[in-house]
Image (cartoon, coloured by chain):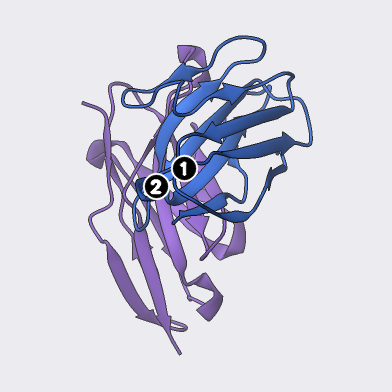
Amino acid sequence: SAVISQKPSRDICQRGTSLTIQCQVDSQVTMMFWYRQQPGQSLTLIATANQGSEATYESGFVIDKFPISRPNLTFSTLTVSNLSPEDSSIYLCSAIGWVGDTQYFGPGTRLTVL
Amino acid sequence: AQSVTQPDIHITVSEGASLELRCNYSYGATPYLFWYVQSPGQGLQLLLKYFSGDTLVQGIKGFEAEFKRSQSSFNLRKPSVHWSDAAEYFCAVGPPTTSGTYKYIFGTGTRLKVLA
């Protein structure tokens, strides 16, 4: 299994600013994903982070709001831009290893926007 | 349409009692099936998974789940609940690795409360 860490674990941000979340996996993985979990809700997939190319976004999510990078096989960042209180959520990074059958999750980043 | 249904939003059990959390899915083919647990303020931890073979799978923390193809269900069970099991439980389905896609579908979750 993959061990995934995220930084920061939580943050409080002002409206209009941006937050970049880092995701680090302890081994090379094939796929990395970013999810949003709004208060009391299930997980919503934001995008698939592709190594060396642009991320693949789900319907309702755009690159200008959620730019994603994945410079190598173990690291990815998600930026949440132009923050509003509606962006207050937990953001989760996940990854699938080379066997490709199971998704593992990071501990999440709890974002509060004032 | 592909979907995962967890009909129970909240469940309360007494410590030491048995537990069953329900999960039904709608999927074109037989998917991979998962149960994850999320403790307050934490990420998701994999409890168990089913790909093929024996339809009763064992997981961590004393949990098990049974796949019933005829009912499109993958219910999670534990014979004796501990106070530390209080958390939110998510059922998820994912495509077989041969499909070339990796998008999971998550249920809405069941929040478990354990009474001392």
Q: Nearer the viewer, residue A60 or B105?
A: A60
Q: Could you say where residue A8 lies in the image, as x and y percent from the top left?
A: 66, 49
Point out the residue furthest to the top here. Answer: A53
Q: CA distance from mark 2 to mark 1?
A: 6 Å
Q: Find disc 1 in the rendering and name its residue.
A: B34
In the displayed structure, would residue B108 be above or below residue A36? Answer: below
Q: Find disc 2 in the rendering and name its residue.
A: B91
- The three-letter amino acid code for the residue at tag 1 is Phe
**Image point (61%, 37%), residue name:** A20
Q: Is residue B58 left or right of residue B8?
A: right
N-terminal of the pair, mark 2 or mark 1, is 1
Q: Secondary structure at mark 1?
A: strand
Q: Nearer the viewer, residue A35 or A114?
A: A114
- Within 10 Å of disc 1 (Cα), the crowding (few <14, some 14-19, many 20+) is many
Among the chains pictured, the one given blue colouring is A
Same chain for labels 2 and 1? Say yes or no. Answer: yes
- The three-letter amino acid code for the residue at tag 2 is Cys
Q: Could you say where residue A91 lies in the image, as x and y percent from the top left?
A: 51, 44
- Snapshot quadrant of residue A70: top right
In the displayed structure, would residue B16 be above or below residue A86? Answer: below
Residue A94: which numbered mark, if any? none
Q: Is residue B44 visible?
A: no
2 and 1 marks in contact (CB < 8 Å): yes
Among the chains pictured, the one given purple colouring is B
User: What chain is tagged by disc 2?
Assistant: B
In the displayed structure, would residue A43 be above or below residue B104? Answer: below
Q: Quadrant of the C terminus of chain A?
A: bottom left
**Image point (46%, 66%), residue name:** B87
Q: Is residue A21 left or right of residue A91?
A: right
In the displayed structure, would residue A93 be above or below residue B95? Answer: below
